[in-house]
Image (cartoon, rainbow, N blue to C red):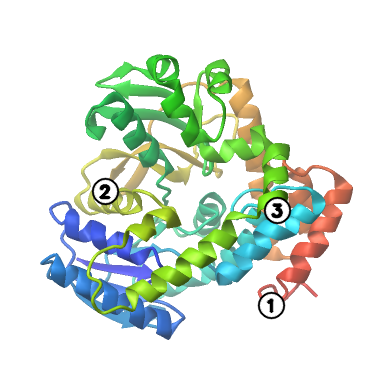
Amino acid sequence: MKLTIVGGGSTYTPELIDGLVRLRDRIDVTEIALHDVSAERLDVLAAMSRRMLSAGGHPAAVTTHTDIAPAAEGAQIVLVQLRVGGQAARLQDETLPLRCDCLGQETTGAGGLAKALRTVPVMLDVAERVRAVNPDAWLIDFTNPVGIVTRALLTAGHTRVVGLCSSAMVFQRHFAKVLGVEPSRIALDHVGLNHLTWERRVLLDGEDVLPRLLGEHGEEVAPATGLPIGLLRRLGTVPSYYLHYYYAHDEVVADQQANGVRAQEVMEIEGRLLSTYADESVTAKPELLTRRGGAFYSEAALDLMASLRAGDGRAHVVNVRNGATLPFLSEDSVIEVPATVGADGPVPLPSAPVEPLLAGLIANVTAYEHLALEAAVHGGRDRVFRALLAHPLIGQYAVADRLTDLLLEANRAYLPWAV
């Protein structure tokens, strides 16, 4: 099988290569086509990938491309991991909102909107280029904001698309470690939107052990959420780490204003990683990569690829068209839930009714995502303002007005209509 990685010059690529070597029994990959707009980074990551494959005894060939068409041609799966504007744009996304005492984060709040404005047009172009040469390929979207990007692609008629995030697998592995069991015995009742999810049940061999996790193991579970165990017990769920941006917004903003944002640390890590990858003596994924984020990315991606190829109907947590799964949302919304994945793609599993405390926030953020997509596709200052005004972390017209000016000024190079 040929696997194409768009954004192959990403520092995440060795995580995928490491997974291909370790999990080669799950999927047979004979060619890895790396695509990137940066030939320099592409050369570094291709050389690193070849060394890792050789050291692991994996026979896959690595090819490099700065043109998407030859990269995607003949591929069964195209995985996209783009960052339009690079880490410099991320730093803007995380620092500009702080001027308005709003959260600085790359996928949530005003920063997430800025990222969507830059990313959606590029992703739509990538998908069109892939479809032109390879309409049967599956496109796996790992590009943030995953929910908005996946909805953009589906809305544009790209039906062979699945959005992927590794956060559910991180929780599954964490719960398994806490309980001292194999991860395969753990299943999650995971519901919400990308980066806005809750674990409502944790099933160990079919039995819900969430009460035990929150009771006996609460001090081990809570740190993964960024929230106090007392709140988790009151909620009766385990929220995604991204929920602490909502539940403790002012505390997070104060910390960011005093101590800086994650982007500053990531930029330093990326520089060190690229230097490490350029070292011809390095043949294995460096430990430093674990600090970059994206834990269990390779496992989540390869498991999903295997099901798409084999049509085995296994369950995966993915970003998928809502349909009738969550009846309080429109059918064309994109949600993050468990779904069976076969050769024809994901089918969401039935979901228990979502309680108002969760459903209200899900509906609010879904409305924002709809408006964000409108702004990203059609442009216009008023559309950006409406999206910001709708976001539950912003919601004040004066703040939305100010943020609109800041985001458009910072992203003029990427938004031809932002003049």
Residue 140, percent from left and from top? 38, 57
**Looking at the rendering, which quadrant does residue 315 occupy?**
top left
Element type where label 1 sits in the image: loop
Mark 2 packing: few (<14 Cα in 10 Å), some, or many (20+)? some
Task: Using the image, determine if residue 363 lies above or below residue 286.
Answer: above
Element type where label 3 sits in the image: helix
Q: How far apart are the alpha carbons under marks 1 and 3?
A: 18 Å
Are the residues flagged by discs 2 and 1 in contact, CB closer than 8 Å?
Answer: no
Return the residue nearer the eye: 368 or 232.
232
Q: Where does label 1 land, which residue?
A: 413
**Circle on res. 303:** 2
Q: Amino acid at mark 3?
A: Ala
Q: Is residue 245 visible?
A: yes
**Circle on res. 110:** 3
Is 355 on the left or on the right of 211, as rendered?
right
Residue drawn 59% across the image and 27% down it: 358
Residue 149, percent from left and from top? 53, 56
Between discs 2 and 1, the one toward the N terminus: 2
Are the residues flagged by discs 2 and 3 in contact, CB closer than 8 Å?
Answer: no
Residue drawn 80% across the image and 75% down it: 419
Between discs 1 and 3, the one toward the N terminus: 3
Residue drawn 33% across the image and 73% down it: 277
**Looking at the rendering, which quadrant does residue 394 occupy?**
top right
Return the residue nearer the eye: 173 or 155.
173
Q: Is residue 324 visible?
A: no
Element type where label 2 sits in the image: helix
Task: Using the image, determine if residue 251 lies above or below residue 156.
Answer: above
